[in-house]
């Protein structure tokens, strides 16, 4: 299971809806494995089917996390027209397989948020607990 602040979920879904029709993306950080801070990023691919974050933006966010005494706890991105499940591309390109991987689906009337542990060979659902 993963603990995430309700306000972080609200900000994450808001960011994803604002960036439609493109995939939105960002990082999450916190202490003790919790998702307490959101770091909205720019999808440099500007695509409705994929996302990428610049190395420079990741390095800057990681330095700010360290200054706050936090660690990377999650990565999120949206699926503007698809279900909240990692694609094969998501599996291949996840460079942080030890952190929670959130997907926000905008396919229906309301956003649906799901979370997974993602490696190139497996996808394992993680229960989300909002605090």
Image (cartoon, helix red, strand yellow):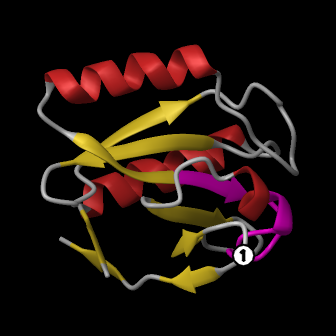
Q: Position of residue 28 (x, y in %)?
A: 37, 46
| Whether residue 114 is visible | no
Q: Residue at x 51, y 49 (%)?
A: 14
| Mark 1, residue position | 121
* Front in this rendered view, residue 105 or 41: 41
Left or right of 100 on screen, residue 37: left
Q: Hey, which quadrant is residue 82 in on the image?
A: bottom right
Q: Residue at x 36, y 27 (%)?
A: 62
Left or right of 23 on screen, residue 76: left
| Whether residue 41 is visible | yes
Which range is magenta? 76-89
Q: Hey, which quadrant is residue 128 in on the image?
A: bottom left
Q: Is residue 90 above or below residue 40?
A: below
Asked if residue 87 is among those painted magenta in the image, a careful observer would answer yes
Left or right of 127 on screen, residue 124: right
Q: Hey, which quadrant is residue 5 in on the image?
A: bottom left
Check disc 1: other Cα within 10 Å, few if <14, some if 14-19, many if 20+: few
Q: Which quadrant: the N terminus? A: bottom left
Numbered circles on residues, count = 1
What kind of element bears circle 1?
loop
Residue farthest to the front, as pictured: 121
């Amino acid at each position: 299971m993963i603990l995430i602040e309700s306000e972080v979920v609200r900000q994450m879904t808001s960011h994803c809806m604002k960036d439609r029709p493109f995939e939105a993306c960002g990082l999450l950080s916190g202490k003790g494995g919790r998702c307490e801070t959101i770091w909205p990023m720019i999808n440099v691919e500007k695509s409705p089917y994929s996302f990428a974050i610049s190395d420079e933006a990741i390095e800057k966010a990681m330095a700010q996390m360290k200054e706050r005494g936090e660690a990377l706890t999650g990565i999120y991105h949206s699926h503007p027209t698809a279900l909240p499940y990692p694609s094969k591309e998501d599996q291949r390109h996840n460079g942080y397989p030890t952190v929670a991987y959130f997907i926000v689906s905008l396919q229906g009337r309301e956003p649906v948020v799901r979370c997974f542990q993602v490696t190139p060979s497996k996808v394992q659902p993680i229960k989300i607990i909002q605090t």
